[in-house]
Image: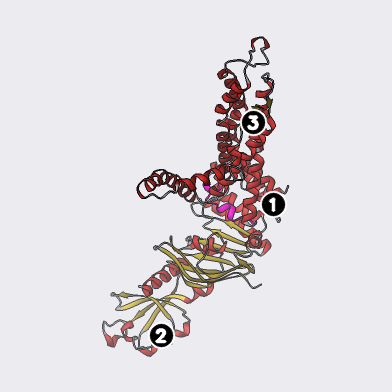
């Protein structure tokens, strides 16, 4: 690693470290909370620390409960990626990018250094989620026929966070105004589509909903770029 | 390489209210070039265009023989920049800012930087955003000089600093220039400050260059001349008498002096033998007064604006 890269990593760490504190706490705590809540909803207890208190839970019941609660993890990954991306450019925005523009490196290289630094920082919450997942699955007696997947879960979290991180990093690289215009524009577009497309369909017989739904599912399904969000986020599965 | 900075036909437009029009300037290597202009003239915009921070509409910029923006990193590696406002990340501590800056500059002189940090009494553990204006000004100059640049581009480096800090900052700058022979391009509206240190001056007003020359030529060639009308013409002013003649100098301003029935002129391109011009029309040159740079600057702006209007 070059000196410049080390310094970029250091400054980005300084810029994002306080933001990482609640994220790391959530990454450690949420997997445990989800598993414990799921066993409770399933009507039993699998606590390894209190074996006397455990009771049988059917695998379908546990998986059903986990499926409902695990929907929170894609959001956690998205928030993590977005937070680190915004922190990466925050200091540059505050100085109107003047300092970065005066540095004797090609701008593309500087942006790549920042991208890499953020990706490395993303390993901290990833490590936290792995610890959280491991603690959550190690702390319960998993019913026969089911297995724990802390590593696969962590890998999915990392990929999802990286995807959002890269997207938000590109968006936030521009001015705050550009980022806001893109964000507000996207929200408005979704609202117009939500209202306008059914109207078009009902009054003019123009069906744009089906192709858009197809595009949406293509994005979320294999081999779409956001497939990682659409797959299984279960810590315990068959 | 004879010129450190060469700008030809630089044009830039920001909305309807502001534009730079066909700005050309040449900064000889080893010179200290004062870039003068009133507030809003376009000095900072020009500086940012020189450093490739903004995209020009037309024109050509070369820094130390590097074309901008094609060869920007190579140019920035040998160019120190002090911006109008501190640009270093405000959340970094001074020591962290120095370390960050050093990592990007291969010519960084750590020993000199440490010495200057002590001389400037910059606390290493204080955040940049919490430095006083004077301390921030010193830090900016330290960062620019410790990278051992061949060219320094300074945008109002002493604006708002108290006299003590200003002296410290300028002393460090002039010591460095004395040691290395680096070129300095310094933008400012503090005319007296530039008068003491610059050997070339360029004047920008409303996005246009209105003068560029060695400071000696500028100051030596611009004079205030007081004229008396010849007696036979009674109260007629000399300027009336000269209307039909081609003057060998440029008249920047003319003011009637009712007490002496004469006029006070500010002219550019004056040499003493030109007194004979007035002899031919019967007017008398009462005295010729040198102007300081500030007066020259004001007269240049006034004449430039009158010509434009």
Q: Between B280 and B92, which is closer to the camera in this rendering?
A: B92
Span colored in magenta: A92-105
Disc 1: which chain? B
Residue neighbourhood size for the residue with mark 3, other residues' Cα within 10 Å, grouped as few (<14), some (14–19), many (≥20): many
Disc 3: which chain? A
**Residue under the image location 62 percent in, 19 percent down:** A58
- Residue matched to label 3: A129
Marks 3 and 1 sit apart, C-alpha to C-alpha, by 46 Å
Q: Between A93 and B165, which is closer to the camera in this rendering?
A: A93
Q: Position of residue A218 (x, y in %)?
A: 56, 45
- Residue closest to the far top: A52
- Residue matched to label 2: B247
Q: Position of residue A105 (x, y in %)?
A: 65, 56
Tell me if I can see residue B292 in this picture: no
Q: Position of residue A162 (x, y in %)?
A: 62, 42
**Residue under the image location 48 percent in, 76 percent down:** B221
Residue B298: quadrant of the picture? bottom left
Q: Nearer the viewer, mark 3 or mark 2?
A: 3
Q: Is residue B271 above or below residue B145?
A: below
Residue neighbourhood size for the residue with mark 1, other residues' Cα within 10 Å, grouped as few (<14), some (14–19), many (≥20): some
As drawn, the label of residue B112 is 1
Q: Nearer the viewer, mark 3 or mark 1?
A: 3
Q: Is residue A102 magenta?
A: yes
């Amino acid at each position: 690693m070059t000196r410049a890269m080390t310094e970029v990593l250091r400054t980005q760490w300084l810029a994002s470290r306080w933001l990482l504190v609640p994220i790391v706490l959530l990454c450690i705590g949420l997997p445990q909370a989800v598993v414990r809540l799921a066993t409770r909803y399933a009507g039993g207890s699998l606590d390894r620390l209190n074996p006397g208190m455990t009771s049988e839970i059917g695998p379908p019941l546990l998986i059903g409960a986990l499926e409902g609660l695990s929907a929170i993890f894609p959001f956690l990954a998205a928030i993590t990626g977005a937070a680190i991306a915004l922190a990466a450019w925050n200091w540059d925005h505050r100085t109107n990018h003047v300092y970065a523009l005066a540095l004797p490196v090609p701008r593309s290289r500087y942006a790549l250094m920042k991208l890499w630094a953020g990706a490395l920082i993303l390993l901290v919450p990833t490590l936290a989620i792995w610890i959280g997942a491991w603690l959550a699955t190690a702390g319960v007696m998993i019913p026969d026929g089911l297995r724990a997947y802390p590593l696969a879960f962590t890998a999915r979290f990392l990929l999802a966070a990286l995807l959002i991180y890269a997207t938000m990093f590109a968006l936030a690289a521009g001015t705050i105004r550009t980022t806001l215009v893109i964000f507000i524009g996207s929200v408005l577009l979704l609202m117009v589509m939500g209202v306008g497309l059914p109207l078009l369909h009902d009054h003019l017989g123009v069906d744009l909903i089906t192709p858009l739904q197809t595009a949406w599912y293509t994005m979320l399904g294999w081999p779409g770029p956001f497939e990682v969000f659409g797959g299984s986020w279960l810590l315990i599965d068959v | 390489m004879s010129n450190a900075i060469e700008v030809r036909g630089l044009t830039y437009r920001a909305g309807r209210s502001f534009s730079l029009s066909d700005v050309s300037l040449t900064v000889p290597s080893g010179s200290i070039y004062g870039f003068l202009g009133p507030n809003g003239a376009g000095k900072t915009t020009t500086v940012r265009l020189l450093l490739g921070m903004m995209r020009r509409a037309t024109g050509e910029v070369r820094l130390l023989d590097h074309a901008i923006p094609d060869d920007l990193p190579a140019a920035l590696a040998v160019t120190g920049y002090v911006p109008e406002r501190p640009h270093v990340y405000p959340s970094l501590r001074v020591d962290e800012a120095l370390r960050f800056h050093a990592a990007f500059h291969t010519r960084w002189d750590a020993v000199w930087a440490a010495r200057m940090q002590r001389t400037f009494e910059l606390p290493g553990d204080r955040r940049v955003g919490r430095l006083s204006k004077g301390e921030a000004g010193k830090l900016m100059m330290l960062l620019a000089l410790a990278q051992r640049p061949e060219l320094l581009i300074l945008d109002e480096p002493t604006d708002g600093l108290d006299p003590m800090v200003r002296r410290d900052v300028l002393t460090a700058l002039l010591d460095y220039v004395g040691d290395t022979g680096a070129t300095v391009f310094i933008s400012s509206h503090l005319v007296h400050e530039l008068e003491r240190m610059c050997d070339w001056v360029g004047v920008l007003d409303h996005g246009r260059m209105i003068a560029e020359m060695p400071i000696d030529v500028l100051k030596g060639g611009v004079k205030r001349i007081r004229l008396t009308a010849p007696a036979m013409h009674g109260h007629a002013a000399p300027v009336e008498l000269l209307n039909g003649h081609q003057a060998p100098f440029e008249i920047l301003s003319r003011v009637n002096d009712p007490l002496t029935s004469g006029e006070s002129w500010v002219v550019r391109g004056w040499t003493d033998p030109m007194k004979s011009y007035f002899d031919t029309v019967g007017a008398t040159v009462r005295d010729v007064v040198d102007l300081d740079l500030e007066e020259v600057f004001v007269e240049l702006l006034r004449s430039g604006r009158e010509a434009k209007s």
